[in-house]
Amino acid sequence: MSEETRSETYAELAATGPYGVRPGHALITMVEPHPGHEYAYNRWYEDDHYYAGAMAMPWMFAGRRWVATRDLQLLRVPEKSAVAQPVTAGCYLSTYWVTDGRYDDHMRWTVAINKRLNRDARVYRDRTHVFTAFQDHESTVYRDGAAGPRDFHALDHPYAGLVLEVIDAESPERRGELLEWLVSRHLPKRVAGSPAAMVTLFRPTPLPGDRMTYVKQVEGVDTRVTLLWFLERDPRECWDPHFTDLEEPATGRRELLAPFIPTVPGTDTYVDQLRQSP
């Protein structure tokens, strides 16, 4: 017997509200599977959670998973990070775009569906959320101007790598100044002639009070800026010339700079390289 789906409600919901393609919001989640659970975690996420816990939800219109093998983890800075302790923690990163103006609608669904998944024993326990936050889109800086993929293409375009950067402003009052420096001065200079086709900038939003207990509340909501650098080359090939001499912001502190490469969906590629260098 089929379950009740309230199909008539879907037509009503589809007829109202924003439905553009701009990524107004994002879910960025960096997770560390517990030792000995790397393969099981990867299969659970790839075979079930990526779809049932993310892509099947309303208004989450694009997603991609990334992985940091041990050699990539060892490139991370700073050694003492306010985001990851130790800085190598968090070998999987998942990134998702949410339609602009649909954050509240999506959050109601995601809290409800994750409660259901938890009740039905479809949540993998042996993992730690190192950095998980829904975020509001602030800006995107493009290397090639109007040419090339836009930010709404970024999670579908076959980029060879991604760098997660997290910067904390000195104070809530100075985050606007930090964003202005990043968008107008720092990033245009850094992406020019580099393998980074674009950099998207976000600021985190607090998680709802009825979130699942295994996900900690977001830190730095008033001060933090999250950047995603989308690379056309493997980050190992361009780390030294492009990421080891980034200027430290005058109004904040870089708390994480972490390179990743894309996972290969449906496979366990790279799982055997999470704890040791290839």
Image (spheres, helix red, strand yellow):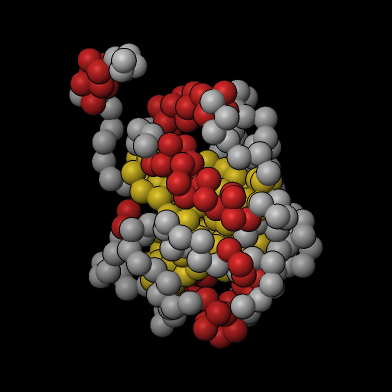
Residue at the outermost front position: 1
Q: Where is residue 238 in the image (x, y as percent from the top left)?
A: 52, 82
**222 is higher (above) or lower (below) than 202:** above
Quarter of the figure that contains the C terminus? bottom right
Q: Considering depth in this image, is 36 or 28 the residue closer to the camera?
A: 36
In which quadrant of the rendered view does residue 157 lie? bottom left
Instruction: Provide residue 262's location: percent of width, then percent of height.
Output: 46, 64
Quadrant of the image containing the N terminus: top left
Measured as percent of width and height from the top left, residue 108 is found at 46, 24
Residue in the picture at 23% in, 26% down: 14
How many numbered discs? 0
Q: In this view, does 148 lie above or below 195?
A: above
Closer to us: 209 or 139: 209
Image point 26% across, 41% down: which residue?
20
Which residue is at 58% across, 77% downward? 243
| Left or right, residue 151 beside residue 137 | left
Instruction: Tell me if 164 is positioned left or right of 140 in this view.
Output: right
Q: Can residue 263 be seen in this view?
A: yes
Write down the quadrant of residue 147 in the picture: bottom left
Up/down of 266 relative to 158, above or below: above
Residue 11 percent location from the top left of the image:
21, 21
Q: Residue at x 59, y 50 (%)?
A: 40
Would you say residue 249 is visible in this rendering? Answer: no
Locate residue 166 relative to residue 80 in the image: left or right.
left
